[in-house]
Amino acid sequence: MLIIFGVRPYETGAVDRRQSNVAPIPPLAHHVMLRLHDGRTIARTAAERREVAAIVDEQGGPRGLLVFRLADSHLHVLLATDTCGASAFANYAACALGWRVTHRVPFDRARVRAVADQHHLKSAFRYILRQEQHHGTALDPEHEASSVPDLVGLRVPALDPWRSLRTLLPRVTRAQVLETIGWALLDRWPLLFEPLAEAVIACRGSLRASRCAAVHLAHPSLGIGAVAAALGIHRRSVYRFLAETPDLAHLRAVELQLRLRTQLALRPGTPSPSPRTFEWPHP
C-alpha cells in the first residue's frame, strides 16, 4: 500500500484495532435475549407475565434497564451496562424466572450483543417494543410482560423507568412509545369499569393505594355497593377509601389500565403502526 509521509490512505471497512493505537470504543448498551432450552412459551398467563415483568425490573433496574419485551418463547432486554453487568443480569434473571415462572425448565445460554452506536440503539429499542408485531403473535395485548406500562404510566414502578432513557435516548417521548405499539389514542378512550379489579392488579405498586384510586374513579358512576362488589371488598372499605386522598400515580395508572381495556375490547383489531416507522437492528 502506498504510504505518503508516513500516513496511510483512508481505508473503508473494519479497522483492526489490535494493530492500531486507538482504544476500543465502549458500547452504549447491551441487548440480552433469553430463551428456554426446549423453546416453549415462557409465560402462559397474565399472572406469569406480570411476574416476568417484576423479575426484569428487579434485576434490570439496578443495571440500567432501558426497555424489555417478552415474546412467546424468548425475552428481549436492553441494558445500559457493560458486558459483565449484562451477563450478571442474564444469570440472575434466568434463575429467578426458572423458580418463579417456568417451573425449573432450564434456559439456553443467553445471547448478549453489544449495541455499538446511536442508530443501533434506536433501532434495537423499537425492535424490542414491537416483538408481537414482528412475530405475528397476540399473547400479551396489554403488554404485561413489557416495560411499556412503566414508560407510559400504566404501572407504578419502584424506580424511574426513564432515568437511563433520558441520557441515552433523550428524543424518545411517551407519545412516540405509544405510537410505536399502536396505542396513540390511549388517553382518549372512555372509562369502562367492568375490569376494575383486573386494572387494580395490573398497575402493580401498592395494592391498597390502587384500590383507593379505583374507588375514587368508579364511585361517581357505580355507587358504593357496585364498587365493593367489583373490587371484592366490604362496603366499609369503600367508605374508608373515599375518606382518603388517592395517590396521583396510582390514580393515573388505574385510569389508564381501564382506558387500555376499553381500547382492546372495542377495537380488538387495532392496526399496527406503519412499517415505515420500524427499522431493523444492525447485523
Image (cartoon, grey):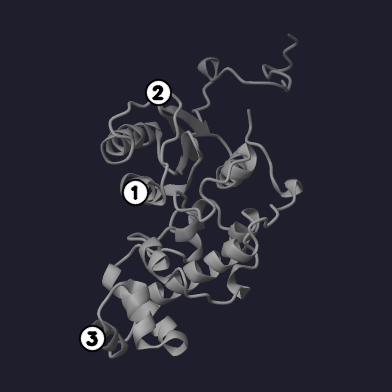
- CB contact under 8 Å: marks 2 and 3: no
Q: Residues within 10 Å of mark 1 (few under 14, many from 20)?
A: some
Instruction: Give the distance between the C-alpha atoms of the residues marked 2 and 3, in whole angstroms.
Output: 50 Å
Q: Which residue is mark 1?
A: 51
Q: Position of residue 223 (x, y in %)?
A: 40, 88
Q: Residue at 51% of width from left, 40% of height from top?
A: 71
Identify which amino acid the numbered label 1 is placed on: Glu
Considering the numbered disc 2 on the image, is that residue within a helix, a strand or a loop? loop
Q: Residue at 25% of width from left, 37% of height from top?
A: 99
Q: Residue at 36% of width from left, 27% of height from top?
A: 107
Q: Which label lies toward us, 1 or 3?
A: 3
Relative to 82, residue 235 above or below: below
Q: Which label lies toward us, 2 or 3?
A: 3
Q: Which residue is mark 2?
A: 37
Q: Position of residue 109 (x, y in %)?
A: 39, 23
Drawn side of residue 206 relative to residue 15, left or right:
left
Relative to 210, residue 44 above or below: above
Q: Residues within 10 Å of mark 2 (few under 14, many from 20)?
A: few
